[in-house]
Amino acid sequence: MKVFIVLLSNRLYAWLKCFHAYDWRADTKSAYSVPLSECNDIEVWQESTHQVYVKEGHRASMFMLQKAGILLRRDLRTGIILEEIYLPPRYKFMEIIEDREVGHLYLKSKIYSKLPHEDVLSAIIIFSFPHLEFSAFLEVRKSVFGKTALKTEICQGTLLVLHSNKSIKLYSLKEILSKFLQHQYKLGETFTENNVTSVVGKHPLGLPLNVMIVDAPPVLFDVKSAGHSLQVGGHPWHYIICPTVGRYQVFSLSKKIAVEGVIEESNEVEPDVVVFHPDESLKIVHATSSKIVIYKIIQGLYPRLEVFFSLDAFEQRSRKDTQRPKRSSFGRKLSQSNYLNDVMSLMLFDYEDELDIFAILRVKQPVLFQGPQLEIIYTDSSSGKILASRHLPDCSWPMVYDCQYSFEIDGPLLIVKTKKYENMKSTMYVFLLTGEDNT
């Protein structure tokens, strides 16, 4: 492994600055800057051969949800504003949700459930993308979806409404639009609302409220889970819930049959991650600070969970450390692992679908006040076999307990990101996997 670009500019991943690189061995050239402080959320879209809705001439784009209530589409390479849409001013839109499979971009407003007099829980705007076309603007009201409704989420064309009694109800957005869409507007058209005339996408009204949900649509799925924890995935479809705090149970979606075996929460430093494997198989990933375990659902008359793959942060184990938990200067509990030394660790994962590779970043800090060691491990997603592992060069990695680590792989590229808790400073490191063990 060779260092591709060891260190790029501060907050690059947050798109404060974007760069051109004509020769990866030379210095990068700044292409443009955008003020990150003015944005509530940012999404990036790039062309893909798998996206059948892509039209010729569409450019890689960056969608920026401005705090001023404007949605921008910029050319990702040049930063030039390609489209600018004024949003309804009566709501504060905070989140962009991208559904690449159907080519939809959702804007979701802040949640208003804490206001007892407010009937609207949240507002949602739907666009087609990458070239923005207005589809719908709707309100989720407690008088329609239930007084116990607390929050809304959107995932894969589904509206999730979370209730105070731990209930999660799923609704089809497609069915909601087909039943309650009153009129289809195009950007640039004139419309009138509350005796005020405006142009779609322009000041003063922005977008018309063209979906009026007057009664509750059919519920696709209703389940109760502690902390509103719900994962749906696998093929055929299964779902994961928490019947009680700290215990994960898997069920068949079609038969509602429980899969034998319970995944127990580890109670380590970082929250556990329990998700379906990104390869859409019948596998489940359980990641903790010190271990990654992949379970496989064995189908049959009595389906069960079986360990498919397991990897510890440290190979050599020793006696339990029975000392009281240590804490950093920011109050974060430090890992109390099963080793003699004061050791801290992180186990992170990512999936490269084109290569069918499940990658694990192992971050080990064997001594409390010495910098951590990073190792990337590539495994074959189908067999679980380790294909390659490389120790990353010492880049003065920040302490595990003082920053947040994340990473992603994209073909031969490995991108490691760190974010300091103290000053929220973000740094990105990019490496190129060459097949040579000369780090």
Image: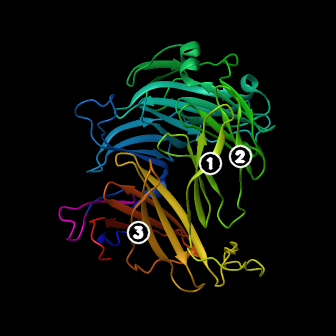
Instruction: Give the residue number, with chain letter if any, for mark 2.
Output: 261
**SS at mark 3 in the image:** loop
Residue type at the position of mark 3: Asn
Residue type at the position of mark 2: Gly
**SS at mark 2 in the image:** strand
Q: Secondary structure of the magenta portion, mostly?
A: loop
- Whether residue 88 sits left or right of residue 7 in the image: it is right
Give the image location of residue 380, x and y in percent. 41, 53
Query: What whole-number distance in Å separates the C-alpha atoms at marks 1 and 3?
Result: 43 Å
Q: Which residue appears at 57% of the width and 18% of the height?
A: 175
- Whether residue 70 sits left or right of residue 399 in the image: it is left
Q: Earlier in the sequence, mark 1 or mark 2?
A: 2
Give the image location of residue 293, x and y in percent. 59, 57
Can you see residue 206? no
- Determine whether label 1 and label 2 are within 8 Å by CB: yes
- Determine whether label 1 and label 3 are within 8 Å by CB: no
Q: Where 391 falls versus 146 (above or below)?
A: below
Residue type at the position of mark 1: Glu
| Residue 392 occupies quadrant | bottom left
Query: What whole-number distance in Å separates the C-alpha atoms at marks 1 and 2?
Result: 8 Å
Residue found farthest to the left: 23
Instruction: Give the residue number, with chain letter if any, for mark 1.
Output: 306
Residue found farthest to the front: 301
Q: Which residue appears at 27% of the width and 29% of the height?
A: 55
Can you see residue 83? yes
- Whether residue 289 sits left or right of residue 115 in the image: it is left
Between 429 and 330, which is closer to the camera in this rendering?
429
